[in-house]
Amino acid sequence: MPDVFLTRELLRDALASGARFVDYGITEGVNVGLRNFKRRMGFLEDPRVVSVEELPDLGIGRQDVSLLEACNFGCGFCYREPWAPNFSTAEAKAEIDAVARQREHSGIALSGGEPTLREDLPELIAHARSRGIRDIQLHSNGWGLVEPGYAESLEAAGLSSAMISLHAYTPEVFARVTSTKPEYFDRTLFAIDRAREAGIRTILSHVVNAYNYKDLPEWVRFIHQRFPGIEVFFFFVYPSVKGLSAPDMYPRLSEVEPYWYDALRVVDELGVRITVDNLAGFPPCFMRGFEHHSRYWFTRDIASRIGDECDDHTIKVPEMRHAPGCAGCRWEDVCPGFWIDYLDRFGDGELQAVP
């Protein structure tokens, strides 16, 4: 049988199905997370569950490269693997080289942990640019950007854009969501200012969770006033890795729905530029009347054709499924449904077909 991407749901049936499952990006010798998972699942010596070093060509435009595990924030919903390698400069450059060699659509997202904790980040950005990678995006909480001249150094090195996390509009909720201190809120706002002043295209990342969803309309008003013209990417709390151990951060979609639609109305009223990620965000049945803000890029075929605008969320489709209520939905052929972990916990009655 052909190789397929490693997912929890597929692994549960691996022995019975006879499939061969492949994780990628880290050789098995250092992939502690995969080894521990195999041990728990009884796959430790099973050659059908392997990790390979070379990245497959997924036909997706922006490949994520996690530069380090360390992060000075403690967001309870973080989906980053705690076994991410802490690359040396040479190893990080080798990862970037692999992206430059293998990908038809040249784009990269440098993430972590928190990548601005690395002293060599400007050097790595410059290296990516020297290898012909046009689209270089930073995923960050903004920590290092407040240092004088730092944002300018990233822009000069060739950084295309920065996606900076801002999950609240008050210091108290910010501290609760990120497990930090209230004073870090103002530092993050200043970091966003510094990135924009340096000429870096800046996008805000906002993860909707149980601690902040009631603030959605006011959050939109706040960022519109504080950062005029800024772009926003909305996500729904992600049931993966660290997030699996923080179930209190997961609201039900039906609980979020009234605040979400109020926020979408404010978005259109104020003209805020947003994108709602459907693979790590809200399904189309929770975007009724606001579909123009959705990213309907669900299939690998579509991803290969729109390259520069797609990222590694596309490979998460196998961790999602439809509900009975999805039957006959106008988006059924392109929407993968919603997270299996969420549906297993809360049931699937909230997903209903859009006529």
Image: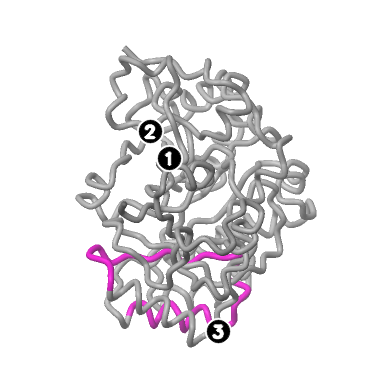
Region of the chain picked out in magenta, as a range: 102-129
Q: Nearer the viewer's eye, disc 2 or disc 3?
A: 2
**Which is nearer the N-term, disc 2 or disc 3?**
3
Give, as a three-letter code, the residue at label 1. Leu
Identify the colour scheme used.
Answer: one colour
The residue identified by callout 2 is: 336
Is residue 16 shown left or right of residue 177?
left
Within 10 angstroms of label 1, few (less than 14), some, or many (20 or more) residues?
many
Q: Nearer the viewer's eye, disc 2 or disc 1?
A: 2
Q: Are marks 2 and 1 in contact (CB under 8 Å)?
A: yes
Separation of marks 2 and 1 at Cα, in angstroms: 8 Å
The residue identified by callout 1 is: 279
> x, y (%) of residue 152?
48, 75
Vertical relation: 230 (above or below) 38: above
The residue identified by callout 3 is: 88
Q: Secondary structure at mark 1?
A: loop
Give, as a three-letter code, the residue at label 2. Pro
